[in-house]
Amino acid sequence: MDKFIKVKDSQVQALLAFYDKELAAIREKMEATQAALNAIELSYQDAVEMVNALKDNNTEAIEVEPNEISRTSKIDLSTLLHGEYPKTGSWWDRIRWVLRSQEMVMSAAEIAEGIYRLHPEFGDADSDERKLAAVNIFSTLSNKFKDNRISRIKENGEYKYGFNEWFDAKNMLIEKYFSIY
C-alpha cells in the first residue's frame, strides 16, 4: 500500500529541497564506501603481490612499529585508503578528505595544516594565498556545522570537528575518533 504525505503548495519546494539534500548525503556516503572498498581491494592485491615477491626472493619483511607511523605518513597512506586527494576540489571536499585520512576529530587549524601540506603553492605562513585558504577553510567548517553536515566538540579549549556519524545520539564523540593530541 502506498502512503502519501499531504503538504501545502508553499511547503513543496522545502520538502523537495530536504529530499534532495538527503539523497545527496546518501550518494556521498555510497561513493565514499565504494572508494573505500576499491582501496581495500587494491591494498589487498598489493599485499598479495608483495608476499609473493618476498616468497620468490626469500627476502625477509621489515616490521614497523605502529607508533612509528606519523600523522604525515597517515596522509601519504590515505591516498590508498581514501582515494586521490581532491587538489582541485571544493574546500569541503578537501576538508572531508583530511578528516577521513586522519579518522579523528581535528581543530580547524589542524585541518588547515593537513591541507597546507598537500598544497605547497600556499607558501609560508604569512603568504596571502595561505591567509585566503585559512579563511575558506574556517568559513566552510562554520557553514557545514550550521547546515548540520559536520559536528564539533570543545576539547582542550578549542573546537574539534568530525563527521556526524562519529558522534552518538547524545552528541558525544565515539571513542575511536578521539583526538590523540
Image (cartoon, helix red, strand yellow):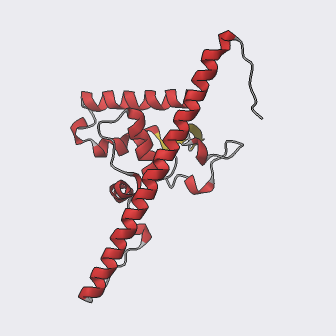
Residue at 41 percent across and 73 percent down: it is 65
Identify the residue at the far bottom of this view: 58
State whether residue 66 appears in this view: yes
Q: Is residue 52 above or below residue 11?
A: below
Residue 70, quarter of the rendered image: bottom left
- Report the quarter where the N terminus lies: top right
User: How far across and how far down the image is residue 2, in percent?
Assistant: 75, 32
Identify the residue at the far front of this view: 1
Count the marks: 0
Residue at 26 percent across and 30 percent down: it is 129
Side (left or right) of 19 relative to 41: right
Q: Nearer the viewer, residue 82 or 31?
A: 31
Residue 14, quarter of the rendered image: top right
Side (left or right) of 133 relative to 24: left
Q: Nearer the viewer, residue 59 or 173?
A: 59
Residue at 38 percent across and 39 percent down: it is 94
User: How far across and how far down the image is residue 8, in percent?
Assistant: 71, 12
State whether residue 158 appears in this view: no
Residue at 24 percent across and 31 percent down: it is 127
User: How far across and how far down the image is residue 43, in percent?
Assistant: 38, 65
Side (left or right) of 95 relative to 15: left
Q: Is residue 76 above or below residue 6?
A: below
Q: Is residue 138 above or below residue 84?
A: above
User: How far across and how far down the image is residue 99, in percent?
Assistant: 46, 46
Identify the residue at the far top of this view: 10
Q: Nearer the viewer, residue 70 or 20?
A: 20
Residue 169, quarter of the rendered image: top right
Q: Is residue 108 above or below residue 103?
A: above
